[in-house]
Image (cartoon, rainbow, N blue to C red):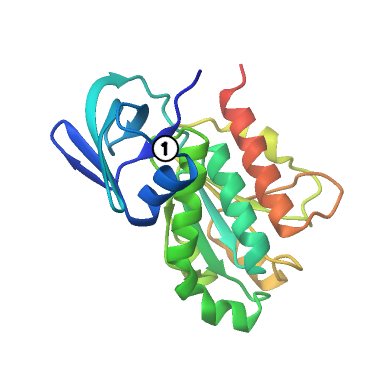
Amino acid sequence: MTRRRWIADEVFGDRAALLGEHANHLIRVLRARVGQDFDIATGDSVRRGRIVSITGDRVDFDLGEEIPVIETMQLTLLLAIFKFDRMEWAIEKCTELGVVRIIPVIARRTNSHLASASGKRVERWQRIAQQAAEQSRRSTPPEISEPLKVADAVNLAAALRILLSESESQTQLRDTVKADRTSGGILLAVGPEGGWTEDELKLFERCGWIAASLGNTILRAETAAIAATAVVTSALYSP
Protein backbone atom coordinates (compact mmCIF):
# COMPACT_ATOMS: atom_id res chain seq x y z
CA MET A 1 0.00 0.00 0.00
CA THR A 2 1.26 3.49 -0.84
CA ARG A 3 2.44 5.38 2.22
CA ARG A 4 0.96 8.79 2.93
CA ARG A 5 3.32 11.72 2.40
CA TRP A 6 3.82 14.63 4.80
CA ILE A 7 5.81 17.82 4.34
CA ALA A 8 7.94 18.34 7.47
CA ASP A 9 7.64 21.52 9.55
CA GLU A 10 11.07 20.94 11.11
CA VAL A 11 14.10 19.01 9.83
CA PHE A 12 17.27 18.45 11.85
CA GLY A 13 19.74 15.88 10.56
CA ASP A 14 18.06 12.48 10.46
CA ARG A 15 15.03 13.69 12.40
CA ALA A 16 11.92 15.59 11.30
CA ALA A 17 8.72 16.78 12.95
CA LEU A 18 5.16 17.87 12.25
CA LEU A 19 3.82 20.65 14.47
CA GLY A 20 0.54 22.27 15.54
CA GLU A 21 -2.59 21.66 13.44
CA HIS A 22 -0.47 19.72 10.96
CA ALA A 23 0.46 17.20 13.65
CA ASN A 24 -3.01 17.21 15.18
CA HIS A 25 -4.52 15.92 11.95
CA LEU A 26 -2.12 12.98 11.96
CA ILE A 27 -2.66 12.31 15.68
CA ARG A 28 -6.43 12.73 16.05
CA VAL A 29 -7.86 12.10 12.59
CA LEU A 30 -5.50 9.39 11.33
CA ARG A 31 -4.82 7.91 14.80
CA ALA A 32 -1.04 7.91 14.41
CA ARG A 33 0.99 5.47 16.50
CA VAL A 34 4.67 5.21 17.35
CA GLY A 35 6.35 2.87 14.87
CA GLN A 36 4.20 3.83 11.85
CA ASP A 37 6.01 4.64 8.59
CA PHE A 38 5.28 7.58 6.30
CA ASP A 39 7.04 9.41 3.47
CA ILE A 40 8.48 12.69 4.77
CA ALA A 41 9.36 15.55 2.41
CA THR A 42 12.23 17.57 3.84
CA GLY A 43 12.51 20.33 1.25
CA ASP A 44 15.40 18.92 -0.79
CA SER A 45 14.43 15.23 -0.70
CA VAL A 46 11.78 12.71 0.36
CA ARG A 47 12.74 10.08 2.93
CA ARG A 48 11.02 7.25 4.72
CA GLY A 49 10.07 8.39 8.21
CA ARG A 50 9.14 6.31 11.24
CA ILE A 51 7.25 7.89 14.13
CA VAL A 52 9.38 7.81 17.29
CA SER A 53 7.34 10.07 19.57
CA ILE A 54 3.95 11.78 19.83
CA THR A 55 3.74 14.57 22.39
CA GLY A 56 0.94 17.13 22.55
CA ASP A 57 0.75 18.74 19.12
CA ARG A 58 4.06 17.37 17.86
CA VAL A 59 5.01 14.20 15.97
CA ASP A 60 8.70 13.28 15.62
CA PHE A 61 10.15 10.98 12.96
CA ASP A 62 13.41 9.13 12.43
CA LEU A 63 14.39 9.53 8.77
CA GLY A 64 15.60 6.57 6.73
CA GLU A 65 16.39 5.95 3.07
CA GLU A 66 15.75 8.52 0.38
CA ILE A 67 12.82 7.95 -1.99
CA PRO A 68 13.08 8.86 -5.71
CA VAL A 69 11.07 11.94 -6.66
CA ILE A 70 9.70 12.81 -10.10
CA GLU A 71 10.64 16.37 -11.07
CA THR A 72 7.72 18.82 -11.12
CA MET A 73 7.06 20.85 -14.26
CA GLN A 74 8.06 24.51 -14.04
CA LEU A 75 4.58 25.98 -14.51
CA THR A 76 3.60 29.21 -12.78
CA LEU A 77 -0.10 30.09 -12.76
CA LEU A 78 -1.12 33.75 -12.76
CA LEU A 79 -4.62 33.49 -11.37
CA ALA A 80 -6.82 36.59 -11.48
CA ILE A 81 -8.65 36.88 -8.17
CA PHE A 82 -12.30 35.78 -8.10
CA LYS A 83 -14.77 34.51 -5.50
CA PHE A 84 -12.67 33.06 -2.70
CA ASP A 85 -14.49 29.73 -2.29
CA ARG A 86 -14.10 28.95 -5.99
CA MET A 87 -10.55 30.27 -6.05
CA GLU A 88 -9.60 27.98 -3.17
CA TRP A 89 -10.94 25.03 -5.13
CA ALA A 90 -8.86 26.08 -8.16
CA ILE A 91 -5.72 26.41 -6.00
CA GLU A 92 -6.27 22.95 -4.54
CA LYS A 93 -6.78 21.24 -7.90
CA CYS A 94 -4.00 23.10 -9.72
CA THR A 95 -1.65 22.10 -6.90
CA GLU A 96 -2.63 18.46 -7.42
CA LEU A 97 -1.89 18.90 -11.13
CA GLY A 98 1.64 20.14 -10.43
CA VAL A 99 1.98 23.93 -10.64
CA VAL A 100 5.08 25.18 -8.83
CA ARG A 101 3.88 28.72 -8.16
CA ILE A 102 0.54 30.53 -8.01
CA ILE A 103 0.45 34.32 -8.26
CA PRO A 104 -2.91 35.95 -7.43
CA VAL A 105 -3.52 38.84 -9.82
CA ILE A 106 -5.70 41.91 -9.28
CA ALA A 107 -7.36 42.47 -12.64
CA ARG A 108 -9.63 45.27 -13.83
CA ARG A 109 -12.71 43.08 -13.34
CA THR A 110 -11.64 41.75 -9.94
CA ASN A 111 -14.29 42.71 -7.39
CA SER A 112 -12.89 45.60 -5.31
CA HIS A 113 -13.83 43.93 -2.02
CA LEU A 114 -12.02 40.74 -3.04
CA ALA A 115 -9.00 42.73 -4.18
CA SER A 116 -8.69 44.55 -0.86
CA ALA A 117 -9.13 41.34 1.16
CA SER A 118 -6.83 39.19 -0.97
CA GLY A 119 -3.60 39.99 0.89
CA LYS A 120 -5.10 38.55 4.09
CA ARG A 121 -6.02 35.31 2.33
CA VAL A 122 -2.50 34.33 1.27
CA GLU A 123 -1.77 32.36 4.45
CA ARG A 124 -4.99 30.38 4.04
CA TRP A 125 -4.20 29.71 0.37
CA GLN A 126 -0.76 28.45 1.43
CA ARG A 127 -2.33 25.99 3.89
CA ILE A 128 -4.71 24.72 1.20
CA ALA A 129 -1.79 24.27 -1.20
CA GLN A 130 0.25 22.36 1.39
CA GLN A 131 -2.63 19.99 2.16
CA ALA A 132 -3.22 19.40 -1.56
CA ALA A 133 0.51 18.81 -2.13
CA GLU A 134 0.61 16.16 0.59
CA GLN A 135 -2.55 14.48 -0.68
CA SER A 136 -1.10 14.28 -4.22
CA ARG A 137 2.30 13.05 -2.93
CA ARG A 138 4.30 16.08 -3.98
CA SER A 139 7.58 16.77 -2.23
CA THR A 140 6.95 20.53 -1.95
CA PRO A 141 3.83 22.70 -2.13
CA PRO A 142 3.62 25.46 -4.72
CA GLU A 143 4.65 28.92 -3.66
CA ILE A 144 1.65 31.22 -3.19
CA SER A 145 2.79 34.79 -3.80
CA GLU A 146 1.40 38.08 -2.57
CA PRO A 147 -1.16 39.52 -5.01
CA LEU A 148 0.14 41.53 -7.98
CA LYS A 149 -1.54 44.07 -10.21
CA VAL A 150 -1.76 43.23 -13.92
CA ALA A 151 0.71 46.02 -14.76
CA ASP A 152 3.35 44.25 -12.66
CA ALA A 153 2.40 40.68 -13.59
CA VAL A 154 2.88 41.25 -17.34
CA ASN A 155 6.59 41.94 -16.78
CA LEU A 156 7.36 38.60 -15.13
CA ALA A 157 9.92 36.56 -17.07
CA ALA A 158 9.73 33.00 -18.41
CA ALA A 159 10.74 31.14 -21.55
CA LEU A 160 7.08 30.82 -22.55
CA ARG A 161 4.33 33.22 -21.45
CA ILE A 162 0.75 32.33 -22.36
CA LEU A 163 -2.41 34.38 -21.87
CA LEU A 164 -5.60 32.34 -21.75
CA SER A 165 -8.09 34.40 -23.77
CA GLU A 166 -11.69 33.65 -24.71
CA SER A 167 -11.42 36.10 -27.61
CA GLU A 168 -8.60 34.11 -29.26
CA SER A 169 -9.97 31.99 -32.12
CA GLN A 170 -6.88 30.72 -33.96
CA THR A 171 -4.34 29.48 -31.42
CA GLN A 172 -5.16 26.54 -29.16
CA LEU A 173 -3.39 26.22 -25.82
CA ARG A 174 -2.15 22.66 -26.38
CA ASP A 175 -0.60 23.55 -29.76
CA THR A 176 1.20 26.53 -28.26
CA VAL A 177 2.81 24.42 -25.54
CA LYS A 178 3.79 21.62 -27.94
CA ALA A 179 5.38 24.14 -30.29
CA ASP A 180 7.44 25.71 -27.52
CA ARG A 181 8.43 22.96 -25.11
CA THR A 182 11.09 24.37 -22.87
CA SER A 183 12.87 23.84 -19.58
CA GLY A 184 12.97 27.59 -19.00
CA GLY A 185 9.58 27.74 -17.31
CA ILE A 186 6.05 28.59 -18.35
CA LEU A 187 3.80 31.42 -17.17
CA LEU A 188 0.08 30.84 -17.72
CA ALA A 189 -2.33 33.73 -17.05
CA VAL A 190 -6.01 32.99 -16.37
CA GLY A 191 -8.48 35.87 -16.15
CA PRO A 192 -11.22 36.73 -13.64
CA GLU A 193 -14.98 36.27 -13.89
CA GLY A 194 -15.99 38.26 -16.96
CA GLY A 195 -12.58 37.81 -18.55
CA TRP A 196 -9.74 40.20 -19.27
CA THR A 197 -10.65 43.71 -20.43
CA GLU A 198 -9.63 44.91 -23.89
CA ASP A 199 -6.97 47.18 -22.36
CA GLU A 200 -5.49 44.23 -20.43
CA LEU A 201 -5.42 42.05 -23.54
CA LYS A 202 -3.53 44.77 -25.43
CA LEU A 203 -1.09 45.19 -22.52
CA PHE A 204 -0.27 41.47 -22.48
CA GLU A 205 0.19 41.57 -26.25
CA ARG A 206 2.56 44.55 -26.09
CA CYS A 207 4.63 42.73 -23.48
CA GLY A 208 5.07 39.68 -25.73
CA TRP A 209 2.57 37.21 -24.26
CA ILE A 210 1.01 34.60 -26.58
CA ALA A 211 -2.80 34.49 -26.50
CA ALA A 212 -4.32 30.99 -26.59
CA SER A 213 -7.74 29.40 -26.26
CA LEU A 214 -9.24 26.31 -24.63
CA GLY A 215 -12.00 26.12 -27.24
CA ASN A 216 -15.33 27.66 -28.13
CA THR A 217 -17.13 27.32 -24.80
CA ILE A 218 -17.02 29.98 -22.08
CA LEU A 219 -15.76 28.49 -18.81
CA ARG A 220 -15.98 29.68 -15.22
CA ALA A 221 -12.69 31.06 -13.95
CA GLU A 222 -11.97 28.06 -11.73
CA THR A 223 -12.83 25.61 -14.52
CA ALA A 224 -10.57 27.46 -16.94
CA ALA A 225 -7.65 27.42 -14.49
CA ILE A 226 -7.93 23.68 -13.84
CA ALA A 227 -8.54 22.75 -17.47
CA ALA A 228 -5.65 24.92 -18.71
CA THR A 229 -3.26 23.44 -16.14
CA ALA A 230 -4.30 19.93 -17.18
CA VAL A 231 -3.78 20.75 -20.87
CA VAL A 232 -0.29 22.16 -20.26
CA THR A 233 0.63 19.15 -18.10
CA SER A 234 -0.53 16.75 -20.79
CA ALA A 235 1.28 18.65 -23.55
CA LEU A 236 4.55 18.71 -21.59
CA TYR A 237 4.56 15.03 -20.74
CA SER A 238 3.04 13.47 -23.86
CA PRO A 239 5.33 11.94 -26.52
Left or right side of 37 for 104: right
Q: Residue, x 86% and y 47% (percent of image)?
A: 216
Q: Residue 77: where, in percent of width, then height?
A: 54, 51
Q: Nearer the viewer, residue 167 or 138?
A: 138
Residue 13 seen by the camera: yes
- Taking the view exactly as shown, the residue that stands out farthest to the left is 13
Q: Secondary structure at mark 1?
A: loop
Amino acid residing under circle 1: Gly
Q: Residue, x 44% and y 35% (percent of image)?
A: 138
Left or right side of 28 for 177: right
Q: Residue, x 62% and y 21% (percent of image)?
A: 238
Q: Residue 199: where, in percent of width, then height?
A: 66, 72
- Taking the view exactly as shown, the residue that stands out farthest to the right is 216
Q: Nearer the viewer, residue 119 or 27?
A: 27
Q: Residues within 10 Å of mark 1 (few under 14, many from 20)?
A: few
Query: On the image, numbered disc 1 is attached to which residue?
Result: 184
Q: Residue, x 42% and y 65% (percent of image)?
A: 123
> In the rendered view of the protein, which quadrant contains the C terminus?
top right
Q: Is residue 112 above or below residue 225?
A: below
Q: Is residue 219 above or below residue 170?
A: below
Residue 154 seen by the camera: no
Counting every numbered tag in the picture gives: 1
Q: Residue 219: where, in percent of width, then height?
A: 80, 54
Q: Residue 80: where, in percent of width, then height?
A: 60, 64
